[in-house]
C-alpha cells in the first residue's frame, strides 16, 4: 500500500501538516472533500470596477519579464489579450510558470484589477483554459502552512499516481443499477468539477457509497448479535436487586423499572446485550445504569462505565460511590489525569479482580487495560461512540454485555436505522414532582428584563448558566462570545456574585476546577460554550440563558435547557435572539425531547440531531444522516439485501467490509 509520503511533493513538513487536519493515508487525502465550491464566473474588463476581483481568459501577448528580489521573492509581468481588450498582468512568486507562459498561450487569470494602470495583480493563473465560462473551484479545510492550492495539488497527484488502486465499495450490481460512475472517476470529478450537474451526480454516488458501507456494517453487527450464545449467561439474585431498589430514596418510574428489567433479562440471557438506553435529560437513566452495574457485580463480574468527558466521569464516580454506600463494592476512577502511580494500582486491581467497577473516559477499553472478568460495559452519551467503537467492544475477548446511554432523543425511524444493530429501552416518563422549565424567547433589546430575571434568581441564592456560541471574537462574525459576556455580566453583577468561564479549548484541569467551583456554589454565574451540554448535574442552578439562540438546533437547546430544573425550585430558560422566533417558540411550548427532535427533523436545515459533536464514524465525510435520509434508506435496503445474498459469501467486497469493521479503531 502506498503511503502519503509516496505522493510527489509531500515531505516531512507537509506530512505533519496533513496529519494535523486528520489526513494520515492516501485514502484520507483523496476523500478530503471540499466543504464548498467557489464559482468563478468570467468577467469583462469593462464591467469590473477599480480594485475589484476579476477572472478573465486571454492569450499571453508578450514574453513575461521576470524580476527577482531578496529572500527568493520574484515578480513577473506580461501583457494579456482578452476579448474586452489588452491588460497588463503581474504576479508574484510564480517564476516557475515562466516557460509555460509563452506568447500565444491561452490562460485564465484571477486577480484584482487596477483600472488606472490597466493592470491585474493576479493571485492565480490557470493554465488549463476551460471552454465554459464558469469555473468551479473546490475550497478545502486547510491549516496554516497548508494552502488550498497545496491540498488540491496533493490530492490530484495522489489520484494520478495511485488512482488505479482505488476500489469501489459498492457491489457491481448496484453500480450498474444506478448508473454510477466508478469511484476513481467520481473522486476526480468531485475535486475538479467541470459542471454543477456532474458535481451533483458524483456527490450522490459518493454519499451512497459512504452510507452503503455504514449500513452494511450496522446490518452485519446486527446479524452477529443475533447469533445465540455469544455472551455471558449468569444468574442474578433478583431478591437482592429488589432490596436495593427499596433503599433508593425516591420511587422509580414505570419506565425506569421496565428498563431495569430489560437489562436484567439481557444480562441473564446467553446472548450478549447490545442495548441502547435512551431518555431525555433528567429522565433518570443514570440510576438505571447503576442498577445494571450492581446486578452485574452480584453475578460475579466486573463492570466499566465510560463517559465522554472527564468532568462527567468524575461526576459519575461520586454518584456511584454514593449509590453503593453500605456495600462492599470497590470502585475506581481512571482518567487521563489519574497519576501514574494510581493508574498502575488500578490496572493491577482490574487485572486481579480486586476492583469491581471502574469509571473513566474511553481509555477504559483500550488494549493495555486488562480485566479479571469484565462482564458489563456502559457508555454514557452513546452518540460519541461510533460503529467501530461498538464493534471494538464486541471484539474484546470476554464478550461483555454492552449498554449505551443516550440523552439525545431520536425520531423512531431514525433510531431504527442508525442504531439498527441495537435493542432499545426508552424512558419517556418523568420522575414525579418535576416542574416544567418555563421557557422565554427574548430579543436583544430586552436584555434589561433578562438581567432583572437573573438578579432575582441570584438574590434567592440560585445559580445561572449563560451560553454563547463563540469563545473569541472572530473577524467575520458578530456572534456573542463568552469573553464579551463575562465583561457584560461583570458590569451588571460585579462585587456581588462570582462569574467565571468554561469552554472547550481550556485544559481539562482548569475546566474541572471551575466546574467544581460551580458545583460548590463558589461561582454563581457560569458562562460557557456548549461544553456544559453533556450531563452536568448542579441542582442549585435554576436559570439557563442562551445568547444567539437561533444558532443552535432545537435538540441542542433542549439539551442545554435540561441542565436546569434538576432540583426542587422552579427553573427557567431564556433564549435570546433577534431572528428565527417561530422555530424558537417551539421551545416555549414543548418540553418533550422526542417531540422536539421530531420537529427538528421536520425543519431539516435547522435540525441538529447530533449537535456538532459527532465523532468516530458517526460523522461522515460527505454524507449527512440528516440531509441524505433518502439515500440512507436506499443504502440500508440495498446493503441488507447484499448481506443476505448467500451467493456472495466468498465475495471480495463483503470480506473487505467485514474486515474493516474489526481492524479500524478510532
Ligand atoms: P439523566 O442521566 O437521564 O439525564 P439522571 O439519571 O442524572 O438523568 O437523573 C436526574 C436526577 O433525577 C438525578 O438527581 C436523579 O437522582 C433524579 N432521579 C432519577 N430518577 C428519579 C425518580 N424516579 N424520582 C425522583 N428523582 C429521580
Ligand atoms: Mg446522564
Image (cartoon, rainbow, N blue to C red):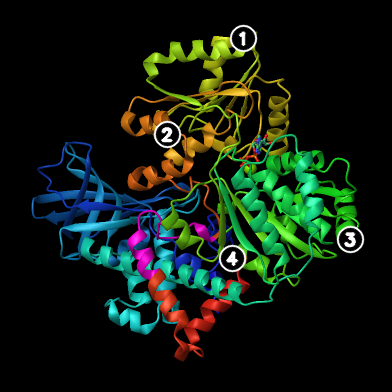
Q: Is residue 97 left or right of residue 239?
A: left
- Residue named by callout 3: 353
Depth check, front residue: 27 or 226 = 226
Q: Is mark 2 within 8 Å of ligand 1?
A: no
Of the image marks 2 and 1, the number of the one nearer the N terminus: 1
Of the image marks 2 and 3, the number of the one nearer the N terminus: 3
- Residue named by callout 2: 590
Label number found at residue 517 = none
Which of labels 2 and 1 is toward the front?
A: 2
Instruction: Tell me the SS state at disc 3.
Output: loop
Circle count? 4
Of the image marks 3 and 4, the number of the one nearer the N terminus: 3
- x, y (%) of residue 438? 48, 24
Check contact, mark 2 vs mark 3: CB within 8 A. Answer: no
Q: Is residue 449 visible?
A: yes
Task: Look at the picture and state if 270 lies above or below 260.
Answer: below
Please give the name of the residue rendered at 58% of the width and 32% of the height, measured from the top-left corner: 563
Crowding at mark 1 (Cα within 10 Å: few <14, some 14-19, many 20+): few
- x, y (%) of residue 167? 43, 80
Depth check, front residue: 326 or 166 = 326
Q: Is residue 258 left or right of residue 180?
A: right
Label number found at residue 388 = 4
Residue 626 falls within the magenta-colored stretch: yes
Please give the name of the residue rendered at 78% of the width and 51% of the height, measured from the top-left corner: 241
Please give the name of the residue rendered at 38% of the width and 26% of the height, measured from the top-left corner: 577
Check contact, mark 3 vs mark 4: CB within 8 A. Answer: no
Please give the name of the residue rendered at 72% of the width and 25% of the height, measured from the top-left corner: 517
- Quadrant of the image where one finds ligand 1: top right
Q: Start and end of the magenta stretch? A: 617-635
- x, y (%) of residue 476? 38, 34
How far separated are the C-alphas under marks 4 and 2?
Answer: 35 Å
Of the image marks 4 and 2, the number of the one nearer the N terminus: 4
Amino acid at each position: 500500500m502506498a503511503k502519503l509520503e509516496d505522493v510527489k511533493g509531500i515531505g516531512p513538513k507537509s506530512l505533519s501538516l496533513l496529519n494535523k487536519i486528520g489526513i494520515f493515508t492516501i485514502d484520507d487525502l483523496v476523500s478530503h472533500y471540499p466543504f464548498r465550491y467557489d464559482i468563478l464566473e468570467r468577467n469583462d474588463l469593462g464591467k469590473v470596477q477599480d480594485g475589484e476581483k476579476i477572472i478573465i481568459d486571454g492569450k499571453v501577448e508578450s514574453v513575461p519579464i521576470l524580476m527577482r528580489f531578496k529572500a527568493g521573492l520574484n515578480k513577473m509581468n506580461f501583457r494579456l489579450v482578452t476579448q474586452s481588450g489588452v491588460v497588463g498582468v503581474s504576479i508574484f512568486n510564480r517564476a516557475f510558470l515562466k516557460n509555460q507562459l509563452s506568447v500565444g498561450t491561452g490562460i485564465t487569470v484571477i486577480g484584482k484589477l487596477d483600472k488606472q494602470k490597466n493592470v491585474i495583480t493576479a493571485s492565480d493563473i490557470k493554465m488549463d483554459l476551460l471552454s465554459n465560462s464558469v469555473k468551479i473551484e473546490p475550497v478545502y479545510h486547510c491549516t496554516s502552512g497548508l494552502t488550498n492550492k497545496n491540498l488540491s495539488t496533493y490530492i490530484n497527484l495522489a489520484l494520478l499516481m495511485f488512482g488505479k488502486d482505488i476500489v469501489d465499495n459498492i457491489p457491481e450490481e448496484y453500480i450498474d443499477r444506478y448508473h454510477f460512475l466508478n469511484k476513481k472517476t467520481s473522486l476526480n470529478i468531485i475535486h475538479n468539477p467541470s459542471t454543477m450537474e456532474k458535481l451533483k451526480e458524483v456527490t450522490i454516488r459518493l454519499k451512497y457509497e459512504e452510507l452503503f458501507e455504514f449500513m452494511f456494517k450496522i446490518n452485519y453487527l446486527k446479524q452477529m448479535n443475533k447469533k445465540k450464545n455469544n455472551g455471558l449467561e449468569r444468574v442474578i439474585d433478583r431478591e437482592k436487586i429488589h432490596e436495593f431498589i427499596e433503599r433508593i430514596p425516591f420511587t422509580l418510574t414505570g419506565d425506569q423499572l421496565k428498563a431495569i428489567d430489560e437489562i436484567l433479562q439481557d444480562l441473564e440471557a446467553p446472548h450478549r446485550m447490545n442495548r441502547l438506553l435512551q431518555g431525555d435529560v433528567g429522565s433518570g437513566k443514570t440510576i438505571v445504569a447503576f442498577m445494571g452495574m450492581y446486578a452485574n457485580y452480584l453475578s460475579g463480574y466486573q463492570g466499566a462505565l465510560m463517559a465522554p468527558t472527564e468532568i462527567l466521569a468524575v461526576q459519575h464516580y461520586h454518584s456511584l460511590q454514593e449509590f453503593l454506600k453500605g456495600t462492599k463494592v470497590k470502585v475506581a476512577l481512571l482518567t487521563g489525569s489519574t497519576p501514574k502511580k494510581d493508574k498502575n494500582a488500578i490496572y493491577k486491581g482490574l487485572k486481579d479482580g480486586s476492583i469491581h467497577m471502574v469509571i473513566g473516559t474511553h481509555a477504559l477499553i483500550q488494549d493495555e487495560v486488562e480485566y479479571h472478568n469484565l462482564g458489563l460495559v456502559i457508555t454514557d452519551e452513546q452518540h460519541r461512540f461510533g460503529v467501530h467503537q461498538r464493534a471494538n467492544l464486541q471484539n474484546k475477548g470476554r464478550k461483555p454485555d454492552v449498554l449505551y446511554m443516550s440523552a439525545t432523543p431520536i425520531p423512531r425511524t431514525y433510531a431504527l436505522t442508525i442504531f439498527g444493530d441495537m435493542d432499545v429501552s426508552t424512558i419517556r416518563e418523568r420522575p414525579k414532582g418535576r416542574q416544567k422549565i418555563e421557557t422565554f424567547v427574548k430579543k436583544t433589546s430586552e436584555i434589561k428584563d433578562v438581567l432583572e430575571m437573573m438578579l432575582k434568581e441570584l438574590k434567592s441564592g440560585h445559580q445561572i448558566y449563560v451560553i454563547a456560541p463563540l469563545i473569541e471574537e472572530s473577524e467575520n462574525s458578530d456572534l456573542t462570545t463568552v469573553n464579551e459576556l463575562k465583561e457584560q455580566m461583570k458590569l451588571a453583577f460585579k462585587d456581588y456574585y462570582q462569574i467565571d468561564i468554561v469552554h472547550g479549548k481550556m485544559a481539562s484541569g482548569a475546566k474541572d476546577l471551575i466546574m467544581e467551583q460551580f458545583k460548590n456554589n463558589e461561582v454563581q454565574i457560569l458562562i460557557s460554550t456548549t461544553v456544559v451540554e453533556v450531563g452536568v448535574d448542579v441542582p442549585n442552578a435554576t436559570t439557563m440563558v442562551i445568547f444567539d439562540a437561533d444558532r443552535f438546533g432545537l435538540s441542542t437547546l433542549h439539551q442545554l435547557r435540561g441542565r436546569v430544573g434538576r432540583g426542587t425550585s422552579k427553573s427557567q430558560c431564556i433564549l435570546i435572539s433577534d431572528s428565527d422566533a417561530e422555530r424558537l417558540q417551539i421551545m416555549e411550548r414543548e418540553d418533550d425531547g422526542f417531540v422536539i427532535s421530531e420537529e427538528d427533523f421536520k425543519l431539516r436545515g435547522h435540525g441538529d440531531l447530533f449537535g456538532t459533536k459527532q465523532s468516530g464514524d458517526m460523522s461522515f465525510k460527505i454524507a449527512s444522516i440528516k440531509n441524505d435520509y433518502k439515500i440512507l434508506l436506499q443504502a440500508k435496503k440495498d446493503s441488507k439485501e447484499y448481506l443476505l445474498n448467500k451467493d456472495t459469501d466468498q465475495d471480495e467486497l463483503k470480506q473487505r467490509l467485514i474486515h474493516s469493521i474489526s481492524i479500524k479503531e478510532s
